[in-house]
Amino acid sequence: MKAREPGLQFYVDKLGRNEQFSFIRYGDGEWSCILQRLTRTGSGSQKFSPGLRKALEDSISVKRSGAYYRAMNPGRIERCRFLPQVEAWLASNAPGLDWHQCTIFYKASFRGQLFPIVKELKRHRVVVVGPKWLEALPFASEFVQVRSHNCWQDADAIFAQLRDLKDVVIAFSAGPATKVLIHRLQPILGEHSWLIDFGSVWDPYCGIKSRKYHKGLTPEILRRNMTGK
């Protein structure tokens, strides 16, 4: 199984040309929920439930039109030793999907190459959806706070807060609930807004190193990614 890697500039250019798209990342946590391998995400931020599993399944198997990019990292799934199960599930439930590589944002962050998309975000009205600490992001025009743990229980309320927005970039960092929210919102907002799943990429810019790779982000890299200098 392969995932397309068009490069960071592909997404930057779409923002620059005002070409709307949605980008949804499926990691080993989401697949563990779908395949009923575990009872929660690896970080412990979200407990799994039958309702969440069904909603995640629908977010992959139910078709969406337009620039709707589902993304994952097949190499990571293979290292976790359940790529064959993922491939079998997709063959039965959502054959023929064109997958993007989900590591594009965090790899750019780690390499000090994230500023181009930060620069574009600063040109737009950005609504950040995530835990309290992300309110400090300098490009956040508006902020919708979610629980740092188990925010799936509030998915309907979060959806209601977002569904009437227009001409915005919604930057999601809400765990597995993000995938379902983007799937539900895209038919409503997709013609005029961007729905982007950034995962945990912004945490270290707000003083929270929530992933192992964050430890390698020096102050110099963090500054370069936010300011270009």
Image (cartoon, grey):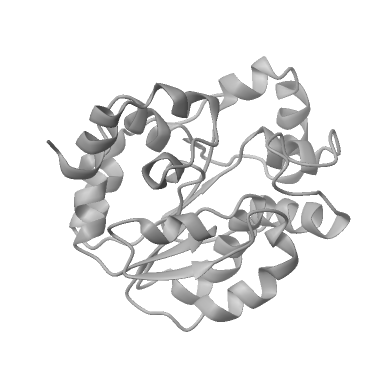
Q: Quadrant of the N terminus?
A: top right
Position of 96 compared to 8: left or right?
Answer: right
Residue sitting at the far bottom = 164
- Above or below, 129 relative to 109: below
Q: Residue at the spot x=54%, y=67% of the render?
A: 145
Q: Residue at the spot x=80%, y=56% of the render?
A: 54
Q: Residue at the spot x=49%, y=63% of the render?
A: 129
Residue sitting at the far left = 229
Q: Residue 131's spot in the image, x, y percent?
A: 54, 57
Position of 205 compared to 227: left or right?
Answer: right
Q: Residue 89's spot in the image, x, y percent?
A: 77, 36
Q: Is residue 195 visible?
A: no
Position of 16 compared to 72: left or right?
Answer: left
- Above or below, 45 relative to 32: below
Q: Quadrant of residue 159?
A: bottom right
Q: Nearer the viewer, residue 223 or 17?
A: 223
Q: Nearer the viewer, residue 169 or 214?
A: 214
Q: Residue 85's spot in the image, x, y percent?
A: 78, 27
